Image (cartoon, rainbow, N blue to C red):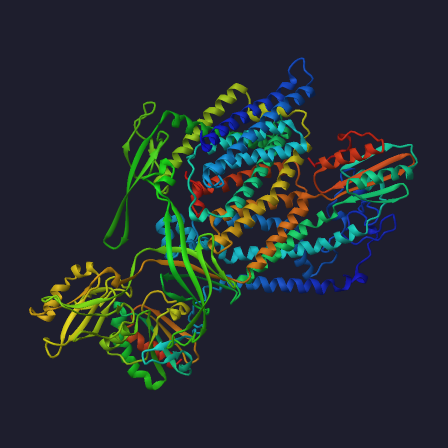
Amino acid sequence: MTDKRPLITNTKCECGHQNPVGTVLCEACGKPVDGEEQLSADNLEMRYDGVARRSQRVNPGVIDLVWNFFSSVKIAIYLIVLTLLGSMLGTVFPQESTFLNIDASTYYQETYGTAGEIYYKLGLSHTYESWWFVTLLVLIGASLVICSLDRVLPLYKALTRQKIRKHRQFLTRQKVVLVTELQDEPEAWVARLVKPLQKKGYRVRTEGGALLAEKHRFSRWGPYVIHIGLIIFLLAVLARGLPGLNMDQHLAFQQGEAVRIPDTTYYLKNEKFTVEFYTEEEMPKEFRGTKILPKLYETKAILYECTADCTDPSKEPKLAEVARHNIQVNSPLSYNGLKAYQFDYDLTPVLRSVQPELTNSESGKVYGKFKLDMKNPQRTFQAGPYTLELKEKYMDFGLNDEGQPVSKSPYPNAPAFLFLIRGPDLPAGGQQYFYFPKQVDKEKFQMEAINDKLGGSGRFLELEVGSMSDVDFSESTAYLNIRVDRAMPFVWIGAGIVMLGLVLGFYWQHRRIWLAIDQGELVLGGHTNKNWFGFRREIVSILAKADLTVDEKSLDNGGGLA
Amino acid sequence: MSLLDFSSDVFIAAFFLYSGSFMLYTIAIMGRKWSGRKPEEHTARWGKIAFIVSSLGLVCHLAYFFTRWSGSGHIPVSNMYEFMTFLSMMVMVAFTVIFSIYRKIILGVFAVPISIIVMAYAAVFPQEVQPLIPSLKSIYLNIHVTLAALGESFFAVGFAAGLMYLLRTVNFSSKEKSDRKQQRLVEFTLFSIIVIIGFLGSVFAFRGAGYETVFVRSNVTIDSPGQGDSTIEKVSYKMPPIVAPYHSEIESFQPFLGMKEPLFEAPSWMNGVNAGRKFNTVLWSLISGAILYGILRLAARKPLGRAIHPVLDGIDENDLDEITYRAIAIGFPIFTLGALIFAMIWAQVAWGRFWGWDPKEVWALVTWLFYSAYLHLRLARGWQGRKSAWLAVLGFLVVMFTLVGVNLVIAGLHSYAGTD
Amino acid sequence: MGKARKPVQIIILFVILLLGGYAIGSSVFGGDGKPKEGGKAPSFELLGLDGQTHTLNEYKGKSVVLNFWGSWCAPCVKEMPALQAQWEKWKDQGVVVVGVNVGEDQMTVENFVKLVDINFPVVMDSGRDAVRSYGVSPLPTTFFINAKGRVDSIHIGQLDLGTLDDQIRKLVEP
């Protein structure tokens, strides 16, 4: 490619160096390349040390045009500002994703009126997943890559190939300048400066009566390190979406039951869920009796891994415990990339099983006790001489429009069981008996009246629960958020690199001092990327070591553009 | 005396020391033209005293912080009162850091009041020590909140220096169109600050008088066909109601200056019973701010910007530009670490997702993007001086919206961090 | 750098285009991973009332009417006769009706099947795995899956005989 580059004569500097197109300051001596620029007395443009960026070339093709578009800081700033504005728009009303169960098409209109409807119609209710927002992020990513590449290589070249002796104009048009008469012998005087400069951390090179002192050059790489970190961060975020790298589900864990975590071989059991509230004494006086503050949510969880018969639904899986953790809000269970977070809870007790006794209501005789599970119960039971056959089961008993018994939901809110009892003193075909384990349901659905109707007036058998120890409840349900996020380490690496770059770039400054003594005149130019104030102070203190007293302010050669 | 009582005592001491140091900084600057004095000597001497007093204030403030920490058993940054007191402390820390680098006495005149205003704003909120709810029980509360506040405090100092730059450089005597525009913008900025002072003034004045009026509103929500659900909401106004909540009735009304009923009702789009109250507060702030501004204007007999302008005479504007940039450059990495990176780490630990586009998260990102744009404009596009100063002023507005506005206007996961 | 410059630029732009396209594409078309009309029907492995494990794979080459139901759901109960009628009508023409019970136990399902008198295959999704992978929320929901294993259409809510017949006809005679 180099051979095709047209030779434009005015890029050749008077020092003999051939500069590429786009060069502002001669790569070798620092003299402005542009003729008009040479006549100006303004501060020099020191960005990227005045070298040509990669994108600056003549006769750009399509690829170059695209490249140039993304390499422009102006475009980058526009992208930042657009993203900023877009993000702001997304906070006007809550995003759809903040709700678990809403019909977005009507919710916004009903809750926020016309404004809400427009908001929804514009797609702002899912701003951050919208094509234009993602596009903005992608464009920022592209800009990060290309902007950095476009600048970092030329800058690297410029900084590694610095010449010690620069053009006078280069020195006098810096923002820190000192021109003063000096009668001393140049080389000896320059040599006197080396020690104090080194003491301040400068690396010093001299060439006759000229000197270049430089420190903290690494600070110049800060911005590029930040950009690399951001690119890694964005790529990691993108990778999170790849299938298999990410899982996110909210599951209910009834106390005491190992529940399979879908799409994995893991099972999780909620041993016990605890919720605690602050006592009156722990609360400030103003809140007592009016406010309740939670103190602790904790799920004692055990994680199992299935070792055999995992996928075959006709067999019971074999489980082996792999982890155990008391999950709290800020302390998830973590095992092998799988994490379980405390999300919500429900303290409604759920009936699991009862052990009723078959008794004779006339004699008080107890025939026997059996265990009746709510889920997958046994079908026949034996109690003394009586055989009970379970005919029907309703988890949430109710009557449908036709007056027939139905279950209103699959949850054991109002369980009911229809038995056919056979045995002594009963009709040959047996006697039907409706059993409601919960006392409230017995009254609500008039169990006695139903059974009187089914068994006639002479019936004498009753099913009753003897004590509370015969009732098995799950006291609580813990809702856990189960997550797998295999790309997370890269997100943190990216964020860490960003932070490193920020510290490098903002807490150190790249400082350079050029100095040349010619014909009894000392010309000093200094450049830093920030903190000119401290830089000037440093130069003054260094010059003082060589018995040259200067006023801090006098070094200032128009620090700002204002 | 218990630790917590001591804590609130030293807090008050810090407040008065800051106020005192503000006056001393002002004397150090204003007094240099007093007759019979050598301006530089005067400024140096009084500036030194002022810095000692403000540092003493900071010591008291730190004492408040650590005694409250040990008294309550958790770091006092868990509610709006504690956060705002902490923020004001960090503003002073940031000021002290920048001051020790640049030794500009005048910075005290503009930065210390920010801390005082934030402190006064803290006092609007209930001050009791609250026990921590489970989601706040984390080491990341200590790290995330403190670093974010520190970063934002450097932005606050950047704001002060930016405003100083504008007051210094805007040509207040010119009648040119572009200059007039700048004058008006500066005046508007000053007016906005005065409105905040007006807000604080009216809160404390009516609180001191024990004012209260209560409105009730019954809400009927229709859950399912045929089933209406009626809830009664009550809202207590601590300022005389200029505006009543939409569709509400008076339960009790305390007359104020012959005002026996609200002047008007909030429009229907101001849903929510609290929206009316917040609107009322805004109106009072504007009214008292306008009165205060009027008084100051009458006293100065010219626009405030023009009145302050001479105070900054002789201050090197390039130094102010440099201070603005430096404060932001110091604050930016701290802000990134505290408000974004540790926020993400905490969110990952507590909620299982490092980013959820919660309004507070989004606004932290907006703040970050804004200062990124600022830095790019300054470093790569050469925006220095005037434009840069305006951005620093605007940036702090974004910061304050993130800290306060989001809690007031938008509710999200961080809603526990604010009351109203 | 010189000579490699243009190819490097092209490669970088290409990678950006690829990744960016993926990012934007997955935000626009990506969705929640639930099957859509025209998409592939997720596989399942569920215990049947017959005590055997059934998978979608075993019906390969046949059109499948996959009906998610619960005994407590009134519209599910009401559409059962229609499903049974269509099962009898089409079973010899390569169509199979499969009922997926959602989260109930064997006894409930058995009683229900007896009560409404159906004899098409019924499987039990006790862990709600299929519900999740098919993204079913209200019951009943019926998936019409063609012989290639693709979802032809999804019907949410009660089916009547006519619609069911039309849908199956569409499935068999594309």
Picture quadrant where residue A379 is located: bottom left
Report x, y in % for residue A256.
Answer: 36, 63
Q: Residue at x 24, y 60 (%)?
A: A468
Q: Residue at x 67, y 34 (%)?
A: B101
Q: Is residue A62 left or right of residue A318?
A: right
Q: Residue at x 66, y 19 (%)?
A: B42
Report x, y in % for residue B227.
Answer: 24, 52
Compared with A184, A88 (above or below) is: below
Of all residues, the one furthest to the bottom in this rendering is: C92
Q: Is residue C97 left or right of residue A236?
A: left
Report x, y in % for residue A5.
Answer: 79, 59
**Residue B328 seen:** yes
Report x, y in % for residue C154.
Answer: 37, 71
Quadrant of the snapshot with the C terminus of chain B? top left
Q: Give A305 or A215, whichever is nearer the viewer.
A: A305
**Residue B183 seen:** no
Q: Is residue C141 left or right of residue B113?
A: left
Quadrant of the snapshot with the N terminus of chain B? top left
Q: Give A140 or B301, whichever is nearer the viewer.
A: A140
Compared with C150, B389 (above or below) is: above
Number of numbered discs overlaid on the protein picture: 0
Picture quadrant where residue B305 is located: top right
Picture quadrant where residue B20 is located: top right
Q: Give B42 or A314, whichever is nearer the viewer.
A: A314
Of all residues, the one furthest to the left in this rendering is: A457
Q: Give A9 or A356, whichever is nearer the viewer.
A: A356
